[in-house]
Image (tube, rainbow, N blue to C red):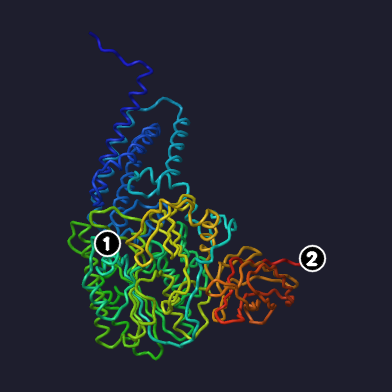
Amino acid sequence: MTATRPTQDHAPRQAWLRAFLVALGALLVLRALLLWQSHLVGLTPWLIPGEILAAVVLTLGRAWLRGWLIIAAAGSLAGLCYYAAGEHLHTHASLFRLAHTWQAADTNFLSATLATPAILFLPVYAAVAFTALWQLRRWQPAARPGRRLLMMLALLAACAVTVHSPTHPGNNPLVASLIQLPGAVWRSLPREVEPDLAAGMGESDLRFFVREDRNTQSGERSNILMIMIEGMSAAYLPSVADHHGLAPEIRLPRLDRYLQDSGYRIYRNFLSLQRQTHRGTYPLLCGDYPRIITAVPKMIVAKDKKMNLSCLPAILADHGYRTSYLQAAPLEFMSKNRFMPLAGFQHLRGRNAFEEQGIPVTGWGPSDADFLAASKAYLVEQAHGENPWFVTLLNVGTHHPFRAEPEGNEQARRQQAFRDMSKAVQDFLAGLDEDGLLDDTWVILTTDEAGGFRRQGERELVLDHNFGMLAVRPPHPDWLASMAGPDAITAQIDIPVTLVDLLDTEGGGNMIGRSLLVAPQRPRGLLFGDTYRARSYFLLEDGRLLDCDETLMRCSQWRFEPDRLFGTLQADTEAEVLMMDIEDRMAVAADASIIRGLGMRDADRYRTAPMEISADHPYRGGQPLSLAAGDRIRLSMSGGSQRHDGGPGAGQLQIEFTDAGSGRTLATRRLDIEGSLSSNASLLLEVNHTPASAAMTLHWRPKRPGNTLWLSRLEVTVEQTETE
């Protein structure tokens, strides 16, 4: 009997099936290696669909595997993709964002990140990928590559619009990178506002732009020490974890007990507003939202445009404080060396400075113990000055790749790194106390970003990676009685507002947030995101949360108990209508993407972020407008005056334009406002023939105490004089 040869119709199908099985087998091997590297769950059925999809994509794309150079390059890129995915999964429990690739190219990042035993996975990944691709070339399809390309693109497009997030751990790293590619370049371009959010489609919800403080001028001039712990979550403190009913893998009982015994108030519902250090540090210093979608961070935009910001360090420096920023890592990474002076820091120290002092430095920088010991010596120097000081510290020992022992187990190194940090911080604070350096000092212990926490034996939930940490100790223990309680929902923007609230100043009027020195007077909304998971969140303090993808179009609603935010989140399956519609979500997100105080300006138009103006906090525009003689400025506003209980208020708005150089008044107008405002005001500026640069200031004079002015929209347009 002779064997039956496959017909011509069956041969392509058999070749396709062989190629698919080879691709799927290789992808399953790569997935197993990925799980081994990341120490996540085993190969469970919910991972299989992502690998099947990737196998189909590779099978369709095998027509382009011609020549060993192409295959070698593709295998190397695939190996690098899987290695990066494994490190990101281990550290952040998500795949990487392609839009962050520019950071990965930084030499400081590469030298520190590659100094880990996990680097041995890289050649293994590359070898498996190269072998599979070399085999796939054996079954080249018939012609018609255009048809296969269209099929691949259609498959990837369908994946992009159906997956919960491109960085979900269940996705295949190769497919996840491909579906992110179209938006990666767009998201890496710096801009002052997000035009893709369709600003103006809806009216901003002013609950997300609340400013609350004491409205009193105490003239407090205590020293301020702010310590940012890299990647810290309050879930690591047993008292907070127990409050929420959580069981994280990392527990720091010694630090928890020390803070409680030493008079610190630990806030148990503290929100970190975004991932990555520069995205989280910005709201801590400037009282402004970070961008909640993955775009160029405001810190980088401000640095590139050399914007002088009215941030906390600048305000304190204007009131005689000596302001210093010390971090263990290189200042050049994320451009801290260029942004921090713009924010108002007068003195900077980074890894190079500590290395010059003879302090041992490896990877990102000195150990936490060495860094804090050097910082203590710096604070001793500051204590000899006459003026108060504001010093901000940022460690690096709890940043990947976690330099702590034991070397062979990355998860164990992570846990040990946090225990080492706990001891170093406790010794540092106790030493300062013993030397009397904290006798007249506000101490704020917080985090640049919440690195996320792993639940023992449980899968992660929404907001696990926004669970920040805040512990505050005022100079006088009796002040705690008048501060917000430990169960209040707090966020990074509340810290600078609190510290400005201590001063005898009307500065910081462009900030948003709620001072910890007052009890909450009205419920507010909070806007925040997780760039690693491509998620954006809208939270209302009455117990509702929207979890959206970064298009803001696909959302799910959650409910929680306000005093146990992170421990009571439940999917709200009974909600028939989401708490915010798509137009309102996009309007709020677009307005929040504007750098507060500076606004957004094009050739002849200036637009501010939504704001609340009070008698104590005027608005001072940060971007002067260029004017010529005879030009007119048209103001378009919407909003109104309100009491704190939400009823209509009344008062007088004074609009003033001054020459940014000489300070000379160019034009002024007063508007009496009662209740809602719907007004278009045109101002004719009488300026010299020499062009002027006009800066805008808005003052509010309420008719009754507590009446404030809300402006959901304020646009200033220059109407140029027509010449004959």
Q: Return the residue at label 2.
A: 723
Identify the mark nearer the N-term, 1 or 2.
1
For image coordinates 22% across by 58% down, the residue present is 411
Residue 229 vs 145, above or below: the answer is below
Amino acid, disc 1: Leu
Classify mark 2: helix, strand or loop.
loop
Give the number of the mark in front: 1 or 2.
Answer: 1
Q: How many marks?
A: 2
- Give coordinates of residue 176: x percent, y percent: 38, 45
Whether residue 351 is visible here, answered yes or no, is: no
Amino acid, disc 2: Thr
- Give coordinates of residue 543: x percent, y percent: 41, 62
- Give coordinates of residue 226: x percent, y percent: 36, 76
Q: Specify the label residue 146 is tagged with.
A: none
Residue 499 quadrant: bottom left
Q: Specify the label residue 246 is tagged with.
A: 1
For image coordinates 44% across by 83% down, the residue present is 502
Quadrant assignment for the N terminus: top left
Q: Residue furthest right?
A: 724
In this picture, residue 634 sits left or right of residue 431: right
For image coordinates 40% across by 47% down, the residue present is 164
Quadrant assignment for the C terminus: bottom right
Whether residue 664 is visible here, answered yes or no, is: yes
Residue 658 vs 41, above or below: the answer is below
Residue 372 vs 541, above or below: the answer is below
Q: Are marks 1 and 2 in contact (CB under 8 Å)?
A: no
For image coordinates 36% across by 36% down, the residue present is 58
Residue 223 quadrant: bottom left
Marks 1 and 2, how far apart at CA: 70 Å
- Give coordinates of residue 116: x percent, y percent: 24, 57
Classify mark 1: helix, strand or loop.
loop
